[in-house]
Image: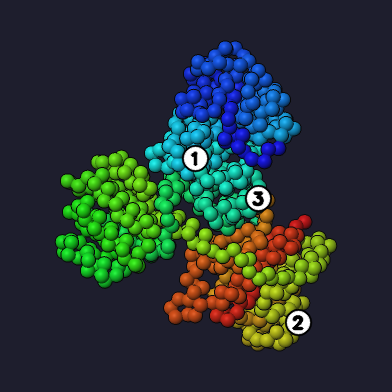
Amino acid sequence: MATTLDPILRPRAVAVIGASRSPNTIGYQVLANLIDHGFTGAVYPVNPHATSVHSVKSFPSVAAIPDVVDVAILVVPKQHVLRVAEECGQAGVRGLVVISAGFKEVGGDGVEAERRLVEIVERHRMRMVGPNCMGVLNGHPDISMNATFAPTMPPFGHAAFVSQSGALGVSVLDYAAEYGIGIAQFVSVGNKPNVSGNDLLLQWEHDPDVQVVLMYVESFGNPRKFFEIASRITKVKPIIAVKSGKSKAGARAASSHTGALAASDTAVDALLAQAGVLRAGSIEELFDMAMAFSCEQLPRSRRTAVLTNSGGPGILAADALEMHGLDLVELEPQTVARLKPLFPPEASIRNPLDMIASATAANYQTALDAILTDERVDSAVAIFVPPLGVRQEDVAESIVRVAQAHPLKPVLTVLMGRQGLPQGKAELHRAGIPAYIFPESAARALAALRRHREWRARPDAPGPEVTVDADCVRRIVAAARAAGRRKLTEVEALDVLTACGIPIARARLARDPNDAAAVAAEVGYPVVLKIVSPEIVHKTEVGGVRTEIDTATEVQLACAEMLDAVHQHAPQARIDGILVQQMIRGGRETITGITRDRAFGPLVMFGLGGIYVEAIRDVVFRIAPIRPLDAHDMLRGIRGTAILDGVRGAPPVDAAALVDVLLRVSRLAVEVPEIEELDINPLLAFPDRVLAVDARVLVTS
């Protein structure tokens, strides 16, 4: 098998098998694109029923071509694909692009046909893009190859695009020119049984023509391999991905909070976040972000400023920037002093800087220069809403001059009026300055630059390893399986945590109310009482929990009441005893856990805990194993991170202790795959420690 994809992406000779004279066919369009857009190599049409196609000599078969063919584009009916692929292999063709459809995507016989096609490709040591794709493109002037059926050849630039959707790929190429995004290479991978997105990432990793990678992904064939490759690339080049299928809910019923919260898209979010990939919610967002990377420099910090001639758009930009984690800093006094004499009293000389509607192109130049000279500002968003008498083109020229004078500070622009919009955008794009129509788009794009800079600055050191007593956990799991149980008892679950080095509240199992009173004296008052039953998942829902018990008499009475409530709500449930546990007051309730995804493997969850965790859903996931930096990201990644930092005078929790627990849960997930699901809820966090109060563990059958 070839070690690179150069025969497909940088060919010297291309055969179009199925080239056609009929204008409304794919075979016609692919050949026309190769010729019309100036492919610098040789093009050989293959059509047994024509002597020439597009005024180019045609050949009856690939074997009849007198030259060495690097790549063959197959646009023949599906029933001929296998025969033609075999002929290509025998003729020494090194790469195939199979545009023909009718394979695995249609099911039935198509699955077997694709298997046989792959066998032919591998036997002849070829590489294959497709089947069921729209082709490949390389816009470098030395190659200028458009081997797709898209009607548009985008301008050459430094973005590479891989798409799993052919139809979407056509739209992408159409809109690339409009957005001012130059395309270096484009590949529609189709069913990807041979060349995958991972192969293309490896191809583009060291390609100097490719400075940013754009992806439309419907599925990950090998997510672990993607993670390995993408983590490496994103330290040098940004990867921006749109992953479809966000709304699909998890298919299986889960018996834990962690499993219930892990919808099908959860693992994708975790994978992309851990690999440093920027996730776009739509193709529009992907283009917004891609355009931003035309900036030659990344912002040195989160500190930014907004310049506008209209208050409303300036406020919208400020709101969006802060929502995306950027800081609108106060301008330095000397900056304000420089600007104040230049504008009328109605202007707002602060950040956002609102010059009001009377601002001229010269005002934009002076004000933007002052902002970028300010040591507190490391990037800027300039917004222009055209009033009468001021042209977009003139303002664009002013912005370009200032941006070029401050090359270390990225400038993004928003041109909101239609009059002169194409000319203004073109002027900015030529200078490598992103231009947007709406403030929110510019904010999202600047946030992408910020996230990529911070990702590249992250240290790669793995940090200290934690250990767990995996053998002890396996013995606990084996005992439960031998008893015919998938769910560990509360006592077994707490023993698992102890084996992992996770601190727990003291607890012991009691047989009955009298025994519970004796156990409580040993554990120490106050205590909590919990019903122990393999058939009860959420104990509070059946009255199976009692708290704040301070005396032996209260223990006996509470046990009796709890048993009555459980018998009433779950009469068939088997009762194995009563857990008597040390009552822990205070602390902030968090949750951590494990679940497993069929494709991605074990996932670690963290969030705010308690009984409302599934309603609030303030949780984040990462793919195990995680590193200390991943664990810290999880703490910062929840919406309620301020609760951990401390609100209304409360001290922050022990973040290091929480990180340690997450690392131990991750290690458990990797070393003991028999654990299918785990919840630690609540995991109480204090300023000086953490303490696990309750745990549920489900093992594989």
Give the residue type at disc 3.
Lys
Q: Residues within 10 Å of mark 3 (few under 14, many from 20)?
A: few
Q: Which residue is mark 3?
A: 225
Q: Residue at x 39, y 58 (%)?
A: 408
Q: Which residue is mark 1?
A: 184
Answer with mark 1 or mark 2, whichever residue precedes in sequence. Answer: 1
Residue under label 2, please give it. Answer: 515
Q: Residues within 10 Å of mark 2 (few under 14, many from 20)?
A: some
The answer to which of 220 and 476 lies nearer the viewer is 220
Say if residue 539 shows up in the picture.
no
Q: Amino acid at mark 1?
A: Ala
Whole-number angstrom distance, CA of label 1 to CA of label 2: 75 Å
Marks 1,2: beta carbons within 8 A = no
Which mark sits nearer the N-terminus, 1 or 3? 1
Callout 1: helix, strand or loop? strand
* Dot label at residue 88: none
